[in-house]
Image: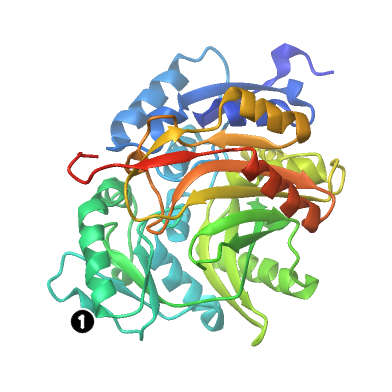
C-alpha cells in the first residue's frame, strides 16, 4: 500500500459534501489526498459571480499549501470549469486549454466549430441579441425553434418558440436575467482570442436553433495526451412536456451502432476543437425514423449527474476517470461490476407557472421510511419547508425541481416502479403565494 507521504494531492474546486464522498469511494483512494479548493456554495448558484476575486482566493489556498499540488479536478459547470482551466494553466498541470474549453461551452462558438467537421450533424442556428429592438428580425430559421443563452446550463432560460408572441415574451424574461451569467462569462472570454466569426456574439446573446427531437443520448469520456476514449452512454429522458428532463438513465438503450456513431462523432468534434487532457460529455438527438444524429451541446467536464449511475452499474464512478486524467495517469474503467444493471437520476418536478410556498416537504422519518424499503436509493431535496418556488435558482422555464432521486434496479421496469414508489413516499404540499408578496 502506498504510504501517506507518497499520496498525490488532488484539489477539488467547488468541493461539496456529497461528491467528496464519491471521491473517497474510488478505487485505491488511499493513494490520493483530496483537498477542498473553495466550497461549492462559494462558487455555484450565485446571485453575482466575482470571477477574479474567487480565483485569487483559490490561488491563496494553493500558495499556502505545504506540499505539491498534483492535480485540480472539478465537476460543476460555470464558473468552476473555466476557473479550473485557468488555475491548471498557471500551475502547469494537465488540463484542457481555456480556449478549447470555451469553444465547447460558448454555444455559438461551439456550433461554428461543429459545422466545420460535421455540417450534417449540426442544426441550423443563428445569434440573437435580446437587447436589440429588432431582435426578431435576426432570427433566420423557421418556427418552431429552440432559443437559449450562449452560456447557460440545465435548460436555464431555454424556450421553445412557436410564434412571435412567444418570442417577445421570452425576450422579456431573458433581458431581466441573462446578464447574471453573461457578464462574468464575458469577463472570461476576454482572456482568449475570439475569432472574428464569433467576436460579436457575447455571453449576453442568445442562440436560436432548429428544433430537434428523438432519443437524447450523451456519451461521456476523456481525451488524454491526444488519446480519445468514451467510458459510458447515458439516456437523457424528457418528461411528458418534451421540454424538461425526467431522468438520466444508464446504460443507454439506443442501438449499439447509434451509440458508436455518437462516440465517433464526439471524438471528431473534440479533435477539431483541440480539447485535450480533460473529460467531457456531449449530448445528441437521434431520430429513429430518419436515423439522423444531431449534436445538442458539449460539456467539457464529467457530469456530476452521472456519478451514481456509473457506481451502481459499474462499481466505480466517473470521478475515477477525472482524477486519473487530471494527474496524467491512464484511467482504467471497468464495466458491469456494480450491484445493479440499471440506474438513473430522476428529477422530481412541480409543473406550475405560479409561485407557491412549501407547507410540507419530506421529513427525516419519511426519508428513512423510503431508505428502509430502498436502501440504495438516494434523495437530495432542493426545497425546505416554508421555501418558495420562486426562490429556487436556475430552474427551467416550465417547472420547478423539488428533489433529485437516485434509483438503481435490475431492469428498466423495476427502475420506474421504484421511482414511483419513492415519489409516493416523498410527500410535498404547497400553498399559493399571493402575487403582492415579493419573491
Q: Please identify the quarter of the rendering in which residue 134 is found.
A: bottom left
Counting labels gives 1
Furthest residue to the left?
133
Instruction: State which quarter of the image contains the N terminus.
Output: top right
Instruction: State which quarter of the image contains the C terminus.
Output: top left
Q: Please identify the quarter of the rendering in which residue 251 is found.
A: bottom right
What crowding class fits label 1: few (fewer than 14 Cα within 10 Å), some (14-19), or many (20 or more)?
A: few
Position of residue 37 in the picture relative to residue 388 (left or right): right
Q: Is residue 162 visible?
A: yes
* Nearer to us in this view, 95 or 316: 316
Q: Is residue 333 visible?
A: no
* Nearer to us in this view, 114 or 327: 114
Residue 255: image x %, image y %?
77, 72
Q: Please identify the quarter of the rendering in which residue 205 is found.
A: bottom left
Q: Residue drawn at (50%, 72%), measured in percent from left and top? A: 114
* Nearer to us in this view, 107 or 419: 419
Q: Residue drawn at (48%, 37%), measured in percent from left and top? A: 382
Residue 282: image x %, image y %?
58, 61
Residue 248: image x %, image y %?
63, 54
Position of residue 417 in the picture relative to residue 401 (left or right): right
Q: Which residue is mark 1?
A: 137
Amino acid at each position: 500500500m502506498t504510504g501517506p507521504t507518497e499520496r498525490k494531492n488532488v484539489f477539488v474546486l467547488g468541493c461539496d459534501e456529497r461528491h467528496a464522498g464519491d471521491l473517497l469511494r474510488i478505487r485505491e483512494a488511499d493513494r490520493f489526498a483530496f483537498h477542498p479548493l473553495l466550497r461549492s456554495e462559494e462558487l455555484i448558484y450565485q446571485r453575482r459571480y466575482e470571477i477574479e476575486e474567487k480565483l485569487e482566493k483559490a490561488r491563496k489556498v494553493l500558495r499556502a499549501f505545504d506540499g505539491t499540488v498534483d492535480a485540480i479536478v472539478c465537476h460543476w459547470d460555470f464558473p468552476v470549469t473555466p476557473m479550473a482551466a485557468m488555475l491548471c494553466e498557471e500551475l502547469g498541470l494537465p488540463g484542457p486549454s481555456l480556449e478549447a474549453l470555451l469553444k465547447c461551452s460558448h454555444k455559438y462558438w461551439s456550433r461554428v466549430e461543429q459545422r466545420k467537421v460535421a455540417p450534417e450533424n449540426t442544426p441550423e442556428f443563428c445569434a440573437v441579441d435580446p437587447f436589440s429592438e429588432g431582435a426578431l428580425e435576426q432570427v433566420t430559421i423557421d418556427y418552431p425553434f429552440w432559443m437559449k443563452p450562449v452560456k447557460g446550463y440545465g435548460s436555464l432560460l431555454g424556450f421553445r418558440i412557436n410564434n412571435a408572441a412567444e418570442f417577445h415574451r421570452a425576450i422579456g424574461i431573458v433581458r431581466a436575467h441573462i446578464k447574471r451569467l453573461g457578464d462574468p462569462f464575458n469577463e472570461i472570454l476576454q482572456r482568449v482570442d475570439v475569432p472574428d466569426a464569433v467576436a460579436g456574439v457575447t455571453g449576453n446573446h442568445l442562440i436560436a436553433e432548429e428544433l430537434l427531437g428523438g432519443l437524447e443520448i450523451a456519451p461521456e469520456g476523456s481525451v488524454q495526451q491526444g488519446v480519445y476514449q468514451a467510458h459510458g452512454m447515458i439516456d437523457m429522458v424528457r418528461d411528458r412536456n418534451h421540454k424538461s428532463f425526467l431522468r438520466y438513465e444508464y446504460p443507454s438503450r439506443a442501438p449499439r451502432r447509434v451509440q458508436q456513431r455518437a462516440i465517433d462523432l464526439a471524438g471528431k468534434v473534440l479533435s477539431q476543437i483541440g480539447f485535450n487532457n480533460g473529460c467531457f460529455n456531449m449530448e445528441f438527438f437521434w431520430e429513429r425514423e430518419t436515423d439522423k444524429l444531431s449534436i445538442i451541446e458539449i460539456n467539457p467536464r464529467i457530469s456530476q449527474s452521472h456519478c451514481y449511475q456509473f457506481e451502481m452499474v459499474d462499481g466505480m464512478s466517473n470521478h475515477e476517470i477525472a482524477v486519473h486524467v487530471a494527474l496524467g495517469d491512464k484511467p482504467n474503467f471497468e464495466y458491469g461490476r456494480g450491484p445493479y444493471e440499471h440506474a438513473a437520476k430522476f428529477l422530481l418536478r412541480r409543473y406550475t407557472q405560479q409561485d407557491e410556498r412549501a407547507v410540507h416537504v419530506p421529513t427525516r422519518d419519511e426519508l428513512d421510511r423510503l431508505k428502509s424499503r430502498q436502501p440504495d436509493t438516494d434523495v437530495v431535496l432542493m426545497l425546505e419547508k416554508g421555501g418558495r418556488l420562486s426562490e429556487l435558482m436556475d430552474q427551467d422555464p416550465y417547472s420547478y425541481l423539488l428533489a433529485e432521486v437516485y434509483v438503481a434496479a435490475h431492469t428498466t421496469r423495476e427502475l420506474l416502479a421504484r421511482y414511483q414508489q419513492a415519489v409516493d413516499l416523498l410527500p410535498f404540499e404547497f400553498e399559493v403565494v399571493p402575487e403582492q408578496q415579493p419573491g
